[in-house]
Image: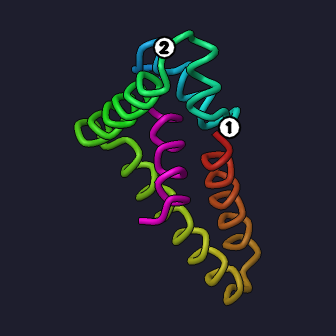
Amino acid sequence: MTEMEKIAETSLLYDFYGQLLTEKQRQVMALYHEENLTLSEIAGEFSISRQAVHDTLKKAEQSLREYENKLGLVEKFMVSTQALEEIEKEIDEIAAAASDAAILERLAKVKNIIVSLEEE
């Protein structure tokens, strides 16, 4: 896994489970991942050592992975997203081959339902 993939994974885990972290872990994660502050800059913000910031980040990231291992919400989200994409593709293919106006209208309604799910 590349560094960019790790960052994306951590961000996604944080989106799902961030509220389960301690307040300090959330603050450190936000400063590091969202504000792009260095460990030294974050250490200065909290008047703690750079090593303490590093340890807090690693512990928070480990907690996020443990939550995912136990709850699997990110995995379920990814599977659902993939399924919706496949359903949309099938609808488009059926609509391209259909000529019945009633069928096309019903397919459009189904596609609108899918779009509304994706926007939530």
Say if 23 sits above or below 60 in the image.
above
Tell me the crowding category of disc 2: few under 14, some 14 to 19, or many 20 or more residues within 10 angstroms, Cα based: some
Q: Main secondary structure of the magenta part?
A: helix
Range of residues picked out in magenta = 1-18
Judging from the image, the colouring scheme is rainbow
Residue 82 in the image, given as x and y percentages of width and height: 49, 64
- Residue at 64% x, 51% y is 113
- Residue at 47% x, 44% y is 10
Q: Is residue 68 shown left or right of residue 33? A: left
The three-letter amino acid code for the residue at tag 1 is Asn
Quarter where residue 93 is shown: bottom right
Residue 105 in the image, given as x and y percentages of width and height: 73, 66
Q: In this orientation, which residue lies closer to the viewer: 105 or 37?
A: 37
The three-letter amino acid code for the residue at tag 2 is Lys
Q: Please check the rendered image and state whether residue 103 is part of the magenta-colored stretch, yes or no.
A: no
Q: Is residue 92 shown left or right of residue 19? A: right
Looking at the rendered structure, the number of numbered marks drawn on it comes to: 2
Question: Which quadrant is the C terminus positioned in?
Answer: top right
**Disc 1 to disc 2, how far (Cα)?**
17 Å
Q: In this orientation, which residue lies closer to the viewer: 85 or 100?
A: 85
Q: Which residue of the protein is positioned furthest toward the bottom in this rendering?
A: 97
Say if 49 sits above or below 36 in the image.
above
Quarter where residue 55 is shown: top left
Q: In this orientation, which residue lies closer to the viewer: 92 or 68?
A: 68
Question: Which quadrant is the N terminus positioned in?
Answer: bottom left
Secondary structure beneath label 2: helix
Quarter where residue 94 is shown: bottom right
Q: In this orientation, which residue lies closer to the viewer: 54 or 2?
A: 54
Q: Residue 36 got which mark?
A: 1
Mark toward the start of the polypeptide (1 vs 2): 2
Residue under label 2:
24
Q: Residue 70 got which mark?
A: none
